Amino acid sequence: MKTLVPEQILGAIHRIVGTPGVKSQSADMARHLVEPRGLYHGQSPLVVSPTTVAEVRAVVELCHGAGVAIVPQGGNTGLCGAAIPSEAGGEIVMSLDRLNRVREIDPLNYTITVEAGCILAHVQQAAGEADRLFPLSLGAEGSCQIGGNLSTNAGGINTLRYGNMRDLVLGLEVVLPDGQLWDGLRRLRKDNTGYDLKQLFIGAEGTLGVVTAAVLKLFPKPREEVTAIVAVATLTGVIELLSRLRLASGDQVTAFELLPRFGIDISLLYVPGVRDPFATRHEHYALMRLSAGRANSGLRDIVEETLGQAMTEGLVLDAVMAENESQVRDFWRIREAIVEAQIPAGGSIKHDVAVPVSRVAEFIERANVAVEALIPGARPCPFGHVGDGNVHYNVTQPTDMDKQAFLDRWAELNAVVHAIVRSLNGSISAEHGLGRLKVDEITHYKSALELDLMRQLKRTLDPKGIMNPGKVVRV
């Protein structure tokens, strides 16, 4: 491929990071140039992997001077194409995978300071070895990196209790688009000295700078956990049950996931090792985990009493509580399998949306009607983190429809579903970000003032437009 980046710039980058920090052969770069669903296949003359912040600064400063664009990249597990360069081939990919040290753990301050390339599971492990908990938990936690989690404001299954990444960060270290280093690695929970600059970079998807390190909050490790899967009579009842459990437990609900019957059916059909915990089929299920800070806290009794009362009232139809770790794994395996099973089940059009928790049932019911009217026979699979209002409203193709013909209606179906989200004052991207996938679509859902403020911020911090261009907001 003929490069659009001057050879002297490529050579200078090579000298900054050394041969181990450069990939320029197609086979070596391949995994950095395509996103997990295969929606985007980018081109780049070089993938650079710095090992120190000084190297990051040197590369960014060099590219800034030459007007060469940079695409920061973590574990490349995102689903909106934010970490993928354009097809033009004029952007350098900066992988943070070698900037991966745990710099400090402060158990008494309940903080851990890590570099951007640290894999999430390794941060969880390091926290656990200090008898602490880092609560962010994602399906991709074995490969996603903290820098990417920060840049996309990752959520996951524990957001209900602990919040998303915005809530889990005390300080950041960021290389700005001109190569300057902002050292904001403060470990303070109170610092009322002006604008909270770190929040500018969380959720910015690498468009305002390169996050190189972060101070993350830690929490006490739970000493008792209660996991249950519950069949609920109605979608509205799912949200009512959540409310009751939060109230009865003193807000000790850690995770609360919606599992639809269709999702369980395809999981049983296509994913080995999945077992249905119920003898009788039901339409709506809630998978929940509650946690307490001490063993024998009485939490299980609270859950049993709450579920028992709900069953007496007809709100809950059936319930199974995990008796051991094997059952806990089996229950959560169902949740994971719903994601996997949608691939062999046929074409699937995705939506990562959020509405107020109290409107979740209304959203799903309205969306189901609208989808059926638009594409008769389409099979909705709404599942996920309804405890925080996030619904992964995915739609699988009709059994008698051609896969590509169905996928060709992606934008049309998105528009119908997102219109309902908008009517409920929701968001068309709850936890996956905007990236390339929704950079144009968001203009229909944000006000002109919001978009103008975003553009002004981008121009102020990145006047040359070199930092991950074409993502989040167009300038």
Image (cartoon, rainbow, N blue to C red):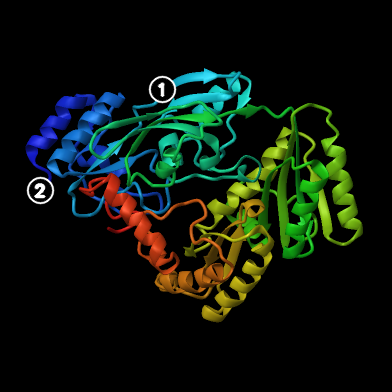
Q: Residue extending furthest front?
A: 193
Front position in the image: 263 or 127:
127
Q: Which mark is residue 101?
A: 1
Neighbourhood count class around disc 2 (C-alpha, 10 Å): few under 14, some 14–19, many 20 upward? few
Provide the residue designation for mark 2: 2
Residue 210 position by quadrant:
top left
Is 268 situated left or right of 280 in this image?
left
Q: Is residue 318 left or right of residue 159?
A: right
Q: Residue at x 18, y 39 (%)?
A: 63
**Which class describes the residues within 10 Å of circle 1: few (<14), some (14-19), or many (20+)?**
some
**Taking 298 as reference, is 286 above or below it?**
below
Q: Quadrant of residue 425?
A: bottom right
Q: Which secondary structure lies at badge 1?
A: loop
Please state which amino acid type lies under the numbered disc 2. Answer: Lys
Placement of 283 over or under 294, stated as above or below: below
Q: Amino acid at mark 1?
A: Arg
Which mark is nearer the camera, 1 or 2?
A: 1
Point out residue 28 in the picture as x, y percentages from the top left corner: 25, 37
Tag 1 near tag 2, CB within 8 Å? no
